[in-house]
């Protein structure tokens, strides 16, 4: 019900979790439908005239999903880092173009840059 009320206004909700087995953490990320990481990426690409072939996005959780929408981002490729949450992993794999690194954080990004020959 919360999701439908929020969607009816201007937000998209993503439920994410973290913490540990002993102390789980859950939070709700509410992002404006007219803004967010995907739209921010589009804006920056347009401002600097960056072709999709010269852009790599990286993410670790569901709130990064809009950057991994291959069609909506006009061919931008991404790297899902080794410590990514399942919601991003499952979302990104449907496009068949992104890199799924075993490495965490910056090591995953340098791995992807090398793999794509940046």
Image: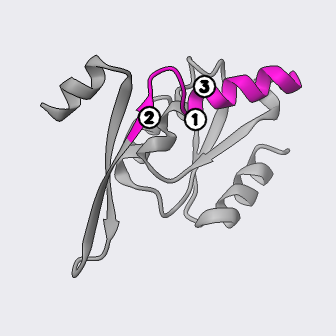
Q: What residue is shown with label 3?
A: 39
Q: Estimate how packed mark 2 is, as few (under 14), some (14 to 19) or many (20 or more) residues with alpha carbons within 10 Å.
A: some
Disc 2 versus disc 3: distance between alpha carbons?
11 Å
Q: Is residue 34 left or right of residue 21?
A: right
Are the residues tagged 1 and 2 within 8 Å (C-beta)?
yes
Q: Position of residue 30 (x, y in %)?
A: 38, 38
Q: Earlier in the sequence, mark 2 or mark 3?
A: 2
- Report the residue at 25% width, 71% height from top: 24
Say what secondary structure mark 1 lies in: helix
Q: What residue is shown with label 1?
A: 37
Q: Earlier in the sequence, mark 1 or mark 2?
A: 2
Say what secondary structure mark 3 lies in: helix
Quadrant of the rendered image containing residue 10: top left
- Report the residue at 24% width, 78% height from top: 23
Q: Is residue 46 left or right of residue 77?
A: right
- 6 or 37, which is in the foreground? 6
Q: Is residue 36 left or right of residue 51?
A: left
Say what secondary structure mark 2 lies in: strand
Image quadrant holding the C terminus, namely top right
Residue depth check, mark 1 versus mark 2: number of the one nearer the observer: 2
């Amino acid at each position: 019900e919360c999701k439908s009320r929020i969607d009816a206004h201007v937000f998209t909700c993503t439920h994410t979790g973290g913490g540990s087995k002993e102390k789980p953490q859950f939070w709700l990320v509410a992002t404006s439908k007219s803004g967010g990481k995907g739209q921010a990426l589009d804006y920056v690409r347009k401002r600097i005239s960056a072709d999709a072939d010269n852009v790599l996005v990286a993410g670790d959780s569901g709130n990064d999903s809009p950057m991994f929408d291959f069609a909506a981002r006009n061919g931008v490729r991404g790297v899902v880092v080794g410590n990514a949450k399942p919601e991003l992993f499952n979302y990104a794999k449907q496009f068949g173009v992104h890199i799924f690194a075993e490495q965490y954080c910056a090591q995953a990004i340098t791995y992807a840059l090398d793999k794509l020959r940046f």
